[in-house]
Amino acid sequence: MSILSFLLILVVAFLAGVEGVLDEFQFHQPLVACALIGLVSGHLTEGILLGGYLQMMALGWANVGAAVAPDVALASIASGILMVQGLTSSLDPNLVISGAIGVAIPLSVIGLFLTKICRTKAITLVQNMDAAAQTGNIRKMEFWHRCGIVMQGCRVMIPALILLWIPASWIAAGLESLPLWLLEGLQAARGLIPALGFAIVINVLASKETWVFFALGFCLACIQSLSLVALSILGAGMMIIYMILKKGEADGPQIELGDILDSSKDR
């Protein structure tokens, strides 16, 4: 790996850690983070594939109240780095991607532990900002605020730096030493991850009114002649029909499609 790729991966890791709390440019999302790591390392195709699998797994991960979800930023960056290290050793891409997916969940749990440490340390930063606010020192408030952002970026960048220092030959030897039963299990898990992500989302959003659309979606997906564009148009049509029926229940039988699509009338 070149020095430029090494530094760019650290930059991506830092941005992913920052976006874990800012949520502005979504650098911490697996599809974006892994694709960027693949881009700067010369393995864009493999990075997109890995990010796509991890993104499906992370669909249902969300912070709810005081419950903090597993750290998707560290899982994405670390898995992407392991993928690059494995591909550098000319290993089978399928083996490398399966191995990277297999370590994503344990790494996300480790990232959750690091997140809790950073958020605990951030209490001191908030107290310092409160003290600066009482004296009207705006520059000091901005300084402590930036310290908190940098701390979140280093939360992912430092583990990424440690992984990058691990020789690629060690990672290759570890992947090649995996037993056959574990490799087959990882391959099976790789196929189940998209279903798992959708299942988590459905478990949150499902209701008696939406189950029928879920069943229709499965039936339409079995029609191989339909493209993704056609499926998207059908999904949008079913959504409009559902909105018309819901609005009809509230406002009576007199309803027009233009009333649903014209958002200016709701203002």
Image (cartoon, grey):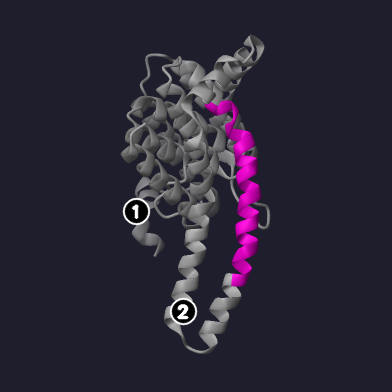
Residue 250 visible in the shown view: yes
Find numbered disc 2 in the image and state the secondary structure of the residue it sits on. helix
- Numbered range of the magenta stretch: 100-124
Which x, y percent locates residue 189? Answer: 60, 21
Magenta residue check for 109: yes
Observer-side mark, 1 or 2, equals 2
Badge 2 is on which residue? 140
Q: Quadrant of residue 47?
A: top left
Q: Which secondary structure lies at badge 1?
A: loop
Q: Which residue is mark 1?
A: 262
Q: Residue at x 60, y 45 (%)?
A: 111
The answer to whether residue 79 is above or below residue 61 is above
Q: Closer to the N terminus: mark 1 or mark 2?
A: 2
Circles 1 and 2: CB atoms closer than 8 Å = no
Q: Residue at x 36, y 49 (%)?
A: 261
Task: State the predominant SS element of the stretch in magenta.
Answer: helix
